[in-house]
Image (cartoon, helix red, strand yellow):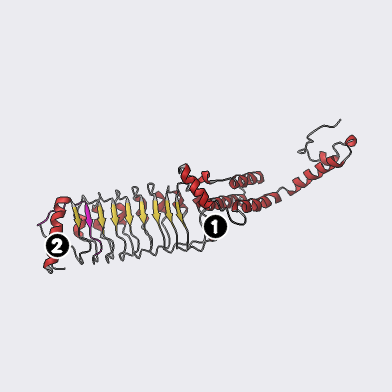
């Protein structure tokens, strides 16, 4: 243990901070070059501490003293060398904000997930390889930042975080996005710099999203260049992919397939507004419209899917054209409905000629 009075100047500084903490309830020991929590015996009563800032030190573990502060609401431990979190952290049932970023954590214990009042968990720039399955129990969590780690997959229980609004997953090793993630009502989602090659079509239902980051991924579905055009284009693409999949599974009939693709081609920014103001929608539409390209994406998609849908109706359309051609080229005095037209009861002349 580091002696409390090893450095007289540091000792006076620490004593001053501890005295202030007793009065204010805020313990501020950041950037003190501490390797251990200062030992003060019973000289200072810190049980009513609501804020403990021990960031930018040289701590190798979460100080046990901090887990005794049952009134603690904010705990800042970023930029240390902490390798593990003690099970006793579960005693901090008033904790709302926990920052353990820039440490050397390889996992988060299940005890962290028992902090049911926690609203913000910041654990970026560690060595995490996964998230605990119990994470779904943190129903009050609003922001989760685990960017810049080594996470290869997400637990399906992440879909149980009903109050989560901001999710940071940048620079991990993710190869897929679980469908359960699309159940969340996020406004911010950062999946940049992972190993994603495709996105679930259900992502298009996340209409509350205002910020979606997908750059630096080897995406093919949707294509990476399309993702650069913005959220609206991404959602349109996924909508069309979903229609294709439904058609392959036989969920959609030919007529429903045509109607679905036409409806998708008419989608505009209002479809994915997510409650944005009119000015915000106009601004987003300008950014995502794709104007200035050689051929707008909507037109290319419309042409592509029109050709695919027309293949299913080629014979009917050929018969219709033949019937109209026969009517238009016969002399008016001899026009009649011949047998070839009668063989198609669905074709009816638009007028009767005496």
Estimate the spatial distance between the alpha carbons at disc 2 and disc 1, rounded to whole Å: 56 Å
Residue 212 at x, y percent in the picture:
46, 54
Q: Is residue 78 magenta?
A: no
Horizontal and vertical percent position of residue 303: 66, 52
Disc 1 crowd rating (10 Å Cα; few below 14, some 14-19, many 20+) is: some
Q: Quadrant of the C terminus?
A: top right
- In the picture provided, is 296 more to the left or to the right than 88? right
Q: What quarter of the picture does the N terminus occupy?
A: bottom left
Residue 30 is tagged as none
The mark nearer the N terminus, 2 or 1, is: 2
For residue 282, say whether it is visible: yes
The residue closer to the viewer here, 334 or 159, is 334
Label 2, secondary structure: give it: helix
**Mark 2 nearby-residue class (10 Å; few <14, some 14–19, many ≥20):** few
Placement of 329 over or under 32, stated as above or below: above
- Would residue 222 be seen by someone viewing this image from the given angle? no
Q: Percent x, y for residue 122?
A: 33, 57
Q: Is residue 32 left or right of residue 187?
A: left
With 95 as the anchor, is 338 left or right in this view?
Answer: right
Residue placed at 78% from the left, 36% from the top?
Answer: 348
Residue drawn 46% across the image and 46% down it: 280
Residue marked by disc 2? 13
Give the magenta-colored segment's residue range: 43-56
Q: Can you identify the residue that label 1 sits on?
A: 226
Q: Residue at x 37, y 51 (%)?
A: 136
Residue furthest to the front in view is 292
Check contact, mark 2 vs mark 1: CB within 8 A: no
Is 29 placed above or below 94 here? below
- Numbered disc 1: secondary structure: helix
């Amino acid at each position: 243990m580091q002696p409390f009075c090893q450095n007289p100047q540091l000792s006076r500084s620490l004593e001053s901070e501890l005295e202030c903490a007793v009065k204010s309830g805020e313990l501020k020991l950041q950037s003190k070059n501490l390797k251990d929590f200062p030992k003060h015996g019973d000289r200072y009563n810190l049980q009513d501490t609501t804020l403990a800032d021990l960031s930018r030190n040289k701590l190798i573990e979460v100080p046990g003293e901090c887990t005794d502060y049952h009134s603690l609401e904010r705990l800042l431990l970023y930029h240390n060398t902490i390798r593990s979190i003690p099970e006793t952290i579960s005693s901090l049932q008033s904790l709302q904000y926990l920052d353990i970023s820039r440490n050397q954590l390889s996992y988060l214990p299940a005890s962290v997930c028992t902090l049911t009042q926690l609203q913000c968990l910041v654990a970026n720039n560690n060595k995490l390889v996964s998230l605990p399955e119990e994470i779904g129990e943190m129903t009050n969590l609003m922001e989760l930042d685990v960017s810049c780690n080594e996470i290869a997959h997400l637990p399906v229980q992440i879909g149980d975080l009903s109050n989560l609004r901001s999710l940071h997953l940048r620079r991990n090793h993710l190869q897929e996005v679980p469908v359960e993630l699309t159940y969340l009502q996020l406004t911010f989602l950062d999946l940049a710099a992972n190993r994603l090659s495709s996105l679930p079509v259900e992502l298009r239902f996340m209409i509350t999203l205002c910020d979606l980051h997908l750059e630096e991924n080897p995406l093919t579905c949707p294509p990476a260049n399309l993702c650069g055009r913005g959220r609206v284009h991404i959602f349109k693409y996924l909508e069309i992919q979903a229609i294709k999949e439904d058609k392959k599974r036989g969920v959609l009939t030919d007529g429903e397939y045509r109607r679905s693709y036409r409806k998708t081609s008419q989608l505009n920014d209002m479809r994915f507004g997510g409650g944005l103001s009119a000015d915000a929608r106009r601004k987003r539409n300008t950014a995502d419209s794709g104007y200035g390209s050689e051929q707008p994406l909507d037109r290319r998609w419309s042409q592509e899917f029109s050709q695919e849908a027309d293949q299913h109706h080629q014979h009917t359309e050929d018969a219709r054209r033949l019937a109209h051609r026969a009517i238009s080229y016969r002399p008016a005095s001899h026009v009649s409905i011949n047998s070839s037209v009668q063989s198609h009861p669905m074709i009816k002349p638009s007028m009767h000629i005496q």
